[in-house]
Image: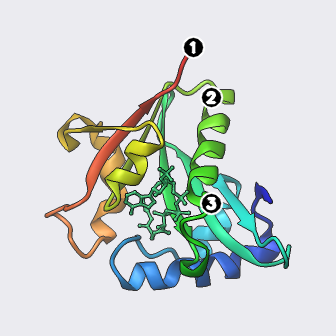
Amino acid sequence: MIRKLLVSEVSQVKDLIEPFVREGLLLPKSLYSLYTSIRDFWIVTGDHDRTEVIGCCALQISWNDMAEIRTLAVKKECQSSGIGKQLVDACIREASELGLKTLFVLTYVPEFFKKAGFSEVDKATLPNKIWSDCIHCQYFPDCRETALIYHLEG
Ligand SMILES: CC(C)(COP(=O)(O)OP(=O)(O)OC[C@H]1O[C@@H](n2cnc3c(N)ncnc32)[C@H](O)[C@@H]1OP(=O)(O)O)[C@@H](O)C(=O)NCCC(=O)NCCS
């Protein structure tokens, strides 16, 4: 089941992303930053245990026409069954309802996002204001992520 994140589930999201943070695939998120950005998050819960969070993804608005897909993670044992795509699609739908024009993502899994309809772009084409979080990354300023964008219709 896909739905918005509840405050009572924030610690589960922290535990879910932690292994991927350790692998350097995701930026670390403090509990404080998760609570303050809770309304950005979509989650998927387990089929058998509806209280278990098995996937998460955030849509963070950057400016009047642009938002970023962030903190996308699916529990290792639940990967490859369409959950990541489901989460990105929910963010795309929400972005469209909000009247946004463009989504972007910085990622080490560009092929996953290409399958979801995103196109690779030169990082230098993204507006400077989106880089504020990058100073927290262990690879800053030598970013090795790929930038991709998705144009919303309308
Ligand atoms: C990337 C991630 C979210 C994908 O989640 P998932 O639930 O396994 O992906 P899905 O099952 O929805 O895959 C959808 C499609 O993308 C493909 N895909 C998934 N991961 C892929 C990858 N790493 N590279 C290329 N294609 C990939 C799938 O094969 C599937 O293709 P299909 O439609 O032709 O069958 C998951 O692997 C993950 O949590 N990775 C670690 C954290 C991470 O890197 N997050 C991205 C941060 S931007």
Query: Is 72 or 61 nearer to us in this picture?
Result: 72
Res 84 → quadrant:
bottom right
Q: Is mark 3 on a helix, strand or loop?
A: helix
Kindly report the distance in space between the C-alpha atoms of the residues bearing marks 2 and 1. 8 Å
- For label 3, the crowd category at 10 Å Cα-Cα, with few meaning under 14, some 14 to 19 and many 20 or more, is many
Amino acid residing under circle 1: Gly
Res 118 → quadrant:
top left
Which residue is labeled 1 in the image? 154
Q: Is mark 1 on a helix, strand or loop?
A: loop
Quadrant where the C terminus lies?
A: top right
For disc 1, does the CB lie below 8 Å from ligand 1? Answer: no
Which residue is labeled 3 in the image? 83
151 is higher (above) or lower (below) than 3: above
> What colour scheme does the image use?
rainbow
66 is higher (above) or lower (below) than 27: above
Q: Relative to residue 82, is residue 117 drawn left or right?
A: left
Q: Relative to residue 84, is residue 148 drawn left or right?
A: left
Q: Is mark 2 on a helix, strand or loop?
A: helix
Res 45 → quadrant:
bottom right
Which residue is labeled 2 in the image? 96
